[in-house]
Image (cartoon, coloured by chain):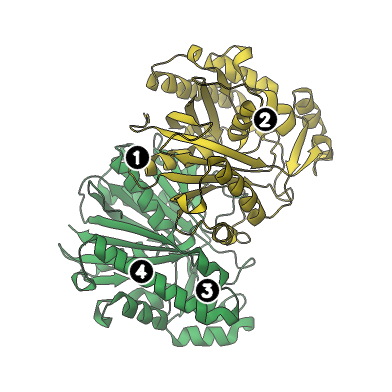
Chain colours: A green, B yellow
């Protein structure tokens, strides 16, 4: 159970994607025609390919997040960087160089990895611990993922979605800032048993175990918040295809009109970035108002499940 | 300042290196003859090359750590995995598979990266936060680094040392276990300005800035513990060459006989593993006794400085 003793707030989102490429033009499209046809039918249309340097992405987005928050670089007490795809042999000095140039010179840097598409909720968990222990008032949280098409296919297992490159940033603070969301709970659940069902013939076992655990993390979150699914204005899942999102919504107990699906077709699955991008879009589209509540669910590497609840303040 | 409100303890160390190779047989030895000659003269003799799978390393070492701690897999509330060199496209499902096989099935997994050779102190910092907030009683902490000789040279910048592959593990607990060290403080300091001095002609600027920051983190640690260097039985630095370690000892205010150097020649620099391996050796050599105090210093990616103080309980 992870309801913060002292509230923390998330705000000042920014993101950048790269060139938008139709999924039919994916590098290994010819080898995956059936999958691409199916994904397209289920709402997955295009993906982003980032060519911009990590350094430039940090500068652009963190500057924007700081500007929105009306904070100076020197207000930042810690940075939390997360990534799934970062090549440690190439990009290991980009972050300190970019932070130095921005003037973020005293913030203790943290790096979060290895939980794939729950890296962002693990980063929020760390941010919450740092705030709770009084180590930080303002934390810059940012994530970067750019897939190397020569190393791995962009198609997720079981044709769930297509990976899309993105850089995202936001600020976590101990105080309310403009357009803030209060983080009411962060829950994680580990299900290593699922990693054994990785052969095509295990599909049924996989789906059963996955559904059971997804239900478990939702119920845990409702219980910790003394709520039911009825109290949330939106369920925000990762940008999987329409069919998968529909199934997840059913398990979580959400009717169709309270499931955020606007970004599936335009973004595909931006690793750990989907939720932060969705919150930006909801804000811009004036679809949020004070008191609105959100349930954000994610699954990392098919083994770590997360549920975060937010209230717009 | 990071003196834990409630004490936490580190214990049950284990490690595994690979084949020991003389530095003269390094893959790029021919291109680096002068450096290798100098390093050899300064105590760096050999490095470890790991060929064992990450999965097998986790199983072997965590089993040993759990055994030493007399804990069962089910006692573990969280795992913290750290790495500098991990290839995210190849080894992304090894950890959950290995943990599942060990019976560590309910521990929330955390992954720490991007601070290179302070990843282990960042992992300890996270462990301390999790314990302080009551999220965990026992945390399995483990790190893995195996350098790809085709991607990068094993020689550290400025001929400081040679990278050596290693897997390490230990347990962090909220209660005293056999052969425990109490963690009295964990300090980090960020110095991104150093990353700009990366050309050979910046060497003097680099050394000056580095020394100043190293002194700063030591003084911060002494101050937070209300101690001076006199109160510590051993300074444990990473396994840099004898000349570098001598300089660091001088800056930290330690005489030669209280600087741990036994592992320089036999291990070289095991990324984030040197300190945990040193503690194991001190223990086996009966060089520790109740009440002994240790200052552990590290520098990650030439920008994050850390100082951890321990007391043998």
**Which circle, 3 or 4, is nearer the viewer?**
4
Q: Chain of mark 4?
A: A
Q: Are marks 2 and 3 in contact (CB under 8 Å)?
A: no
The answer to whether B215 appears left or right of A182 in the picture is right
Residues packed near mark 1 inside 10 Å, few (<14), some (14 to 19) or many (20 plus): many
Residue that mark 3 sits on = A156
Residues packed near mark 4 inside 10 Å, few (<14), some (14 to 19) or many (20 plus): some
**Mark 1 to mark 3 CA distance (whole Å):** 38 Å
Q: Secondary structure at mark 2?
A: helix
Q: Chain of mark 2?
A: B
Q: Secondary structure at mark 1?
A: helix
**Which circle, 4 or 2, is nearer the viewer?**
4
Counting from the top left corner in percent of width and height, residue B213 is at 49, 25
Same chain, labels 2 and 3: no
Numbered circle sitting on residue A24: none
Residue that mark 1 sits on = B132
Q: Are marks 4 and 1 in contact (CB under 8 Å)?
A: no
Q: Nearer the viewer, residue A46 or A252?
A: A252
Q: Nearer the viewer, residue A162 or B58?
A: B58
**Mark 4 to mark 2 CA distance (whole Å):** 52 Å
**Mark 2 to mark 3 CA distance (whole Å):** 43 Å
Residue that mark 4 sits on = A216
Q: Secondary structure at mark 4?
A: helix
Same chain, labels 2 and 1: yes
- Badge 3 or badge 4: first in the primary sequence: 3
**Would you say residue A278 is visible in this rendering?**
no
Residues packed near mark 2 inside 10 Å, few (<14), some (14 to 19) or many (20 plus): few
Q: Are marks 1 and 3 in contact (CB under 8 Å)?
A: no
């Amino acid at each position: 159970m992870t309801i913060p003793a002292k509230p923390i707030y998330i705000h000042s989102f920014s993101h950048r994607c790269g060139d938008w490429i139709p999924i039919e033009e994916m590098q290994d499209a010819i080898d995956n025609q059936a999958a691409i046809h199916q994904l397209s039918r289920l709402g997955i249309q295009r993906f982003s390919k980032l060519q911009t340097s990590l350094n430039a992405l940090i500068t652009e987005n963190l500057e924007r997040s700081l500007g929105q928050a009306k904070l100076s670089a020197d207000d930042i007490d810690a940075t939390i960087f997360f990534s799934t795809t970062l090549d440690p042999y190439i990009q290991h000095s980009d972050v300190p160089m970019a932070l130095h140039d921005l003037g973020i010179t005293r913030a203790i840097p943290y790096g979060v990895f290895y939980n794939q598409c729950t890296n962002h909720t693990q980063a929020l968990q760390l941010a919450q611990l740092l705030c709770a222990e009084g180590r930080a008032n303002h934390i810059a949280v940012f994530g970067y993922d750019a897939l190397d098409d020569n190393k791995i296919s962009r198609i997720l297992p079981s044709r769930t979605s297509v990976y899309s490159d993105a850089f995202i940033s936001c600020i976590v603070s101990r105080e309310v800032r403009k357009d803030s969301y209060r983080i009411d709970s962060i829950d994680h659940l580990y299900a290593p048993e699922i990693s054994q069902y990785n052969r095509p013939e295990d599909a049924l076992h996989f789906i059963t175990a996955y559904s059971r655990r997804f239900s478990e993390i939702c119920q845990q979150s409702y219980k910790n918040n003394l709520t039911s699914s009825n109290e949330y204005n939106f369920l925000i899942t990762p940008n999987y295809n329409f069919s998968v999102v529909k199934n997840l919504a059913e398990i979580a107990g959400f009717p169709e009109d309270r499931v955020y699906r606007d970004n599936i077709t335009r973004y595909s699955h931006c690793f750990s970035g989907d939720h932060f991008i969705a919150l930006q879009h909801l804000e811009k589209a004036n679809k949020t108002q004070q008191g609105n509540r959100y349930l954000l669910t994610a699954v990392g590497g098919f083994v770590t499940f997360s549920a975060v609840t937010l209230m717009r303040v």
